[in-house]
Image: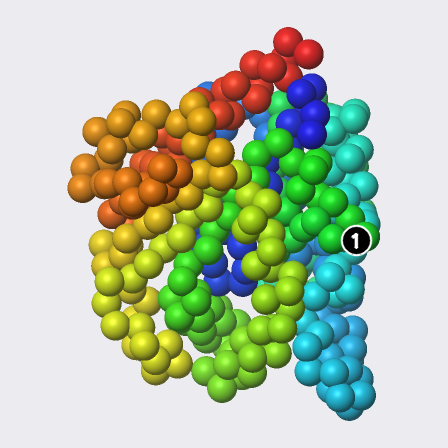
Amino acid sequence: MSKKHPIISVTGSSGAGTTTVKSTFDQIFRREGIKAVSIEGDAFHRLNRADMKAELAARLDAGDQTFSHFSYEANELKALEETFRSYGETGTGRTRHYVHDDKEAERFGVEPGNFTDWRDLEEGSDLLFYEGLHGAVHSDEVNLSALADLKIGVVPVMNLEWIQKIHRDRASRGYTTEAVTDVILRRMHAYVHCICPQFTETDVNFQRVPVVDTSNPFIARWIPTADESLLVIRFKNPRGIDFPYLTSMIHNSWMTRANSIVIPGGKMDLAMQLIFTPMIDRLVRESRRA
């Protein structure tokens, strides 16, 4: 952690909704006049698309059905840790971009499924914003959690997460439901051992809970809407959180535990604005004083 160069890390698995959260933070940064540099977890995958496909096939041939993008060894976590550490100490570091599709290929001049070259982060920023799979990892090899100043988990209940992933991958990547299901099953071991433990490290967790039937996510025709959901917000340390203010500002919200509040799903953006604006302002004020 660094008072002079703070880091915000948003962590969630594929289909959890971390990209939507990023747009809310972008709004806060613009409104508050904060210059943030962003890095994506995908930039720190170890293999490009073709090499990952070959590695998966080799692992399956060897009887290993647990290897996936969620796995620690499929990612350059040491490089991510070094970027976190470098930014915290100097306000800069290195990143790159993973090119997902033809639109991004045209923008970056790199074929889909490959990485751009490594580049230095822009200097003179107020904070670093990370969004991806592994932003709060604490393992025997790396401790990203200790280097981030504000850690946020985005964790829909599992069936909802699967529905979101299935619909996204079918619509934007052309996968079949069967293909996405195979990916979900292959990732389950690493989800349990690499993704879930991070949510004990996060400072705030957002868990969306549908209030419609999602008992069979593999045949769901629609993603439950925000208005068909509740949102459970859990604070690791509730000290300093003004719960009466939050419940008065967010209608139809209530507390379930001393560190948890439940709100209507459609109020997620408002809740994030109310919760994180003062936190971010405090981080930036302290960094400028330092």
Q: Among all residues in the image, which is located at the extreme front? A: 258
The residue closer to the viewer here, 170 or 163, is 163
Q: Which residue is mark 1?
A: 140
Give residue 87's position: percent from left, percent from top: 75, 31
Position of 55 relative to 27 (above/below): below
Give residue 145's position: percent from left, percent from top: 67, 42
Q: Quadrant of residue 247?
A: top left
**Position of 90 compared to 128: left or right?**
right
Q: Among all residues in the image, which is located at the extreme left? A: 252
- State whether residue 37 appears in this view: no
- Amino acid at pointer 1: Asp
Q: On the rendered image, what quadrant is the C terminus found in?
A: top right
Give residue 148's position: percent from left, percent from top: 65, 36
Dot 1: element: loop
Q: Residues within 10 Å of mark 1 (few under 14, many from 20)?
A: few
Q: What residue lies at 46% left-to-right and 55% top-to-bottom?
A: 155
- State whether residue 179 appears in this view: yes
Q: What residue lies at 40% left-to-right and 53% top-to-bottom?
A: 207
Q: What residue lies at 56% left-to-right and 49% top-to-bottom?
A: 200
The residue closer to the viewer here, 155 or 79, is 155
Counting every numbered tag in the picture gives 1
Q: On the rendered image, what quadrant is the N terminus found in?
A: top right
Give residue 2's position: percent from left, percent from top: 70, 25
